[in-house]
Image (cartoon, helix red, strand yellow):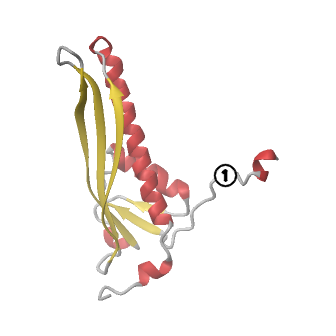
Amino acid sequence: MVLSACGFGLRAPVDYPFHTLYSSAPRYSPLGAELQRQLPASGKLVYLTQPAQPTDAQVVLDVFGEQRKKTVIGVNATGQAREFQLTLTLKFRLRVPQSHVVIPDTTLTQQRTMSYDETLALAKEAEEAALYRSMQVDLVQQIVRRLAALDAKALEKSSDE
């Protein structure tokens, strides 16, 4: 009761202006699996992934790939790495098949900082994998929010505008 007074509420299902979406992300890749999990779960949507289905969908989500980067940002007195910056970059666009681009080429980036200790190498490897998974979930949530913000007029716009 107290939470309802402060404006808190569970996230309601999204009402997308389209009902079918095809994604070019590989179906069994971590990114493809996360898209397949989050998009239909956030609203009424049929998520298509078969290579022959792009023309069956109302919109196509082209995923141009993700890039992972690990950069040393801190070293100790002997020159050994003590801190890394992990970066995950994802490029995508949304289009209507054989028509126009709804969301132009967009690059999303997430960064995390991770300390490193060679005596805990296995634990740090697992931490790095968990950080990349977390960044991937955040990027997919950003895509979901962008798709949810679309209106039907954006999909109907003619290609010569």
Q: Quadrant of the rendered structure where residue 105 is?
A: bottom left
Q: Which residue is drawn at 50% across and 75% down?
A: 151
Which residue does the image show at 47% across and 71% down from the upper left? 150
Q: Position of 21 compared to 14: left or right?
A: left
Asked which secondary structure carries label 1, the reply is: loop
Q: In which quarter of the image is residue 136?
A: top left
Q: In this view, does 110 lie above or below 156?
A: above
Indicate the amino acid at tag 1.
Answer: Leu
Seen from the viewer's position, the closer of residues 161 and 14 is 161
* Image position of 127 with respect to 157: above or below: above
Considering every residue shown, the one lying at the far left of the view is 79
Question: Farthest residue in the top direction?
Answer: 119
Q: Where is residue 97 in the image (x, y as percent from the top left)?
A: 32, 75
Q: Please, is residue 75 above or below residue 155 in the view?
A: above
Residue 104 in percent (x, y) is at 31, 70
Q: On the picture, is 59 further left or further right than 66?
A: right
In terms of depth relative to the viewer, which is nearer, 62 or 52? Answer: 62
Q: In which quarter of the image is the C terminus?
A: bottom left
Would you identify the image quadrant in which residue 94 lies?
Answer: bottom left
Residue closest to the far right: 1
Task: Identify the residue shown where x is 23% and y is 34%.
Answer: 71
Q: Is residue 41 above or below residue 115?
A: below
Residue in view at x 53 percent, y 54 percent? 41
In the rendered image, residue 132, in percent from the top left (x then y), is placed at: 35, 37
Q: Return the x and y of residue 91 as percentages of the image width and height.
A: 28, 57
In front here: 5 or 158? 5
How many labels, in total?
Answer: 1
Q: Residues within 10 Å of mark 1 (few under 14, many from 20)?
A: few
**Residue position for label 1:** 10
